[in-house]
Amino acid sequence: MDRVIAAFYKFVKLSNYADRRQPLLNLCQQYQIKGTILLAPEGINGTIAGTRSSIDAIFAYLRADPCFTDLEYKESIATKLPFDRLKVRLKKEIVTLGVPTVDPTNLVGTYVKPQDWNALLANPDVIAIDTRNHYEVEIGTFAGAIDPHNNSFNEFPEYVATHLDPHQHKHIAMFCTGGIRCEKATSYLLSQGFENVYHLQGGILKYLAEIPATDSQWEGECFVFDERVAVTHGLEPGTYQICWGCGDPIAVADLTAPHYEPGICCPRCYPTLTPAQRASRTERSRQLQLEAEILADDERVKQTE
């Protein structure tokens, strides 16, 4: 049975965000939802998966709340659940920039629909900035976009301070996976005196879902934070796998590299792998293999009953 994957977020002031956790957790458990939902004073952010009816039930519940009546989400389909557990967490921010004064509900950049994004990128006065982490940018980005080489989103303000000037950079277009980082990034730039700031509405995922490959300015694949690892046009599964040692995406060619060890390390993390890390990852890999064997045995028993 196919599973629906739904990615969503909304910046909205939630003074009682902590009180919302348990009822939402209970409902998700009731409908056997897997994935992660974050609640913070500034809003909600999540990616969840389940059957068609269970996903519909969760969003019917959320949209019945006056704070989330216009909550939108992006869907894709997987042949199996891409998450193995459910987490509903309370956080200080639903995406961590580390600048408490930034408020996308009050100040935000100009949304650009996927259908208008190519024309914006073609404008020679516009610079495009990928606000994702460097390991995400490495496997795919828009043609000509700038990679700030950030290891985490909270490094973005430093990049702005050292590389951007509101007097020199008059038109800035930004994008990210689903749009949430750019909500904060555009809000931050506007607070720093930048005037013409744009962001891709719905993020890369919406662009890949709506723009045909023949018309696309996207190059490579888009990293996603689930077992699919990456997707491409039409949100079809990509070719990348994950290094279960460091968590970074690895290409098919890396699987035959000298320093690739399944569950232990990849060519990227091998140079910094300590003996203690190797021992820990080896034990984790052994435990996962044991769990897989137990599940396989259980499944064989069920088939013979």
Image: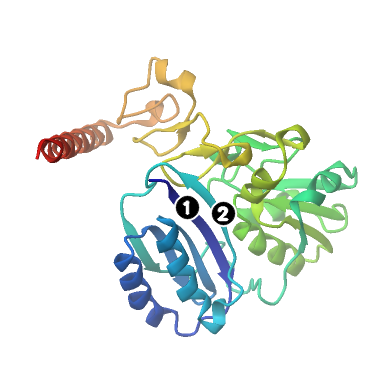
* Residue sticking out furthest to the front: 305
Residue 102 to residue 204: above or below: below
Choose between 296 and 156: the one closer to the eye: 296
* Image spot of residue 139 (x, y percent): 58, 33
Q: Nearer the viewer, residue 275 or 205?
A: 205
In the picture, measured across the screen, residue 113 lies left or right of residue 39, that is: right
What residue is at 52 percent from the left and 57 percent from the top? 7
Q: Is residue 245 above or below residue 9?
A: above
Q: Position of residue 160 (x, y in %)?
A: 70, 54
Q: Residue at x 45, y 44 (%)?
A: 78
Residue 196: % across, % down: 84, 61
Q: Quadrant of the N terminus?
A: top left
**Disc 2 + disc 1, Cβ < 8 Å:** no
Q: Which amino acid type is shown beneath numbered disc 2?
A: Phe
Task: From the image, tell me which residue sits under label 2.
Answer: 153
* Rendered image quadrant of residue 140: top right
- Does 248 sit left or right of 128 as displayed? left
- The residue lying toward the viewer, choosing from 65 and 132, is 65
Query: Upstream in the sequence, badge 2 or badge 1?
Result: 1
Determine crowd level at label 1: few under 14, some 14-19, many 20+ residues with C-alpha closer than 10 A.
Answer: many
Residue 272 seen in render: yes
Name which residue lies at 64% across and 46% down.
209
| Residue where numbered disc 1 is placed | 5
Q: What secondary structure is marked by label 1?
A: strand
Amino acid identity at mark 1? Ile
- Between the residue at mark 2 and the residue at mark 1, the CA separation in whole angstroms equals 24 Å
- Residue 192 x/y as whole percent: 75, 66
Q: Is residue 220 above or below residue 73?
A: above
In the displayed structure image, the side of residue 279 where residue 120 appears, left or right: right
